[in-house]
Amino acid sequence: MKYFEFFSNDQARNNWLVNTELKEPPWVVTKPRYASCFCLKCELPYLDALFEEGFDDSVKIRARGDLFESSDGFVCVNEKVKGLVESDGFRGVAFKPVGKAGWWVVNATCRVSGDEQAYTRRNTCPGCGRARQTYGQICCVSQIDCPKEAGTFFSPTFARSGYSDRDLFVTEDIVTSFKKHGVKGGMFSRLLDATEFEAVKAANALMDPLRWPKDSKVVL
């Protein structure tokens, strides 16, 4: 079975779920109801706590496609995608409504172990241990404990950084279903097998980047 990571398209407009934009400095402020969902030392958000708190009906989503990542790090899907996930019996994900236009925030409930060394982190908070900057990605099946069950959304047990949620992975049948039903927005990148991964690392060591296999990118 193959596994893929989801990458959202860039959006023309900001879509804030827990923050409010202002027309003057400080430009963006957090809504008071979420004050307890941040680290007291570095003020980075705890996204699981924010998801548990829920989201306002007053939020206005202006996004292209059927799924996207919000400006504060949440993957969101519309009614089409949510209905597809539920009708196909896919597992490992929970939804909470946001706004009044049929959008839902995604939270991966299947959490698996992974190699944190795949990420390079900068400006780590001594209090909560999370980083303000993170580079790199999990790109090989050996770097994460992929579930054996088909139809599964999953994420590492650790967040990517303080400003974004855990990276979101899926089994190949979810990608196939999304493509079949014309879901738009973003891309799925296949996790490499050991041989492919070693070839990419060897090419990078020679400063000669190797193109990933043709079937490794699925654009929605």
Image (spheres, rainbow, N blue to C red):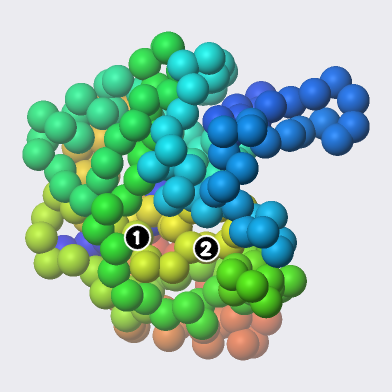
Q: Tell whether 219 sits left or right of 81.
A: right
Q: Tell whether 2 sits left or right of 197.
A: left
Look at the image and tell me in which quarter the C terminus lies. top left
Q: Which residue is mark 2?
A: 160
Callout 1: 10 Å neighbours few (<14), some, many (20+)? many
Query: Is residue 144 placed above or below 13 in the rendered structure?
Result: below
Q: Tell whether 194 sits left or right of 27.
A: left
Report the amino acid beneath label 1: Ser
Tell me where residue 49 appears, x and y as whole percent: 45, 49
Which element carries disc 2, helix, strand or loop?
loop
Name the foreground residue: 69 vs 213.
69
Residue 197 picture quarter: bottom left
Name the foreground residue: 210 vs 129.
129
Name the foreground residue: 192 vs 8.
8
Residue at image location 42% in from the left, 33% down from the top: 54
Q: Which residue is mark 1?
A: 155
Tell me where residue 114 appears, x and y as whole percent: 37, 76
Which residue is at the far right? 25
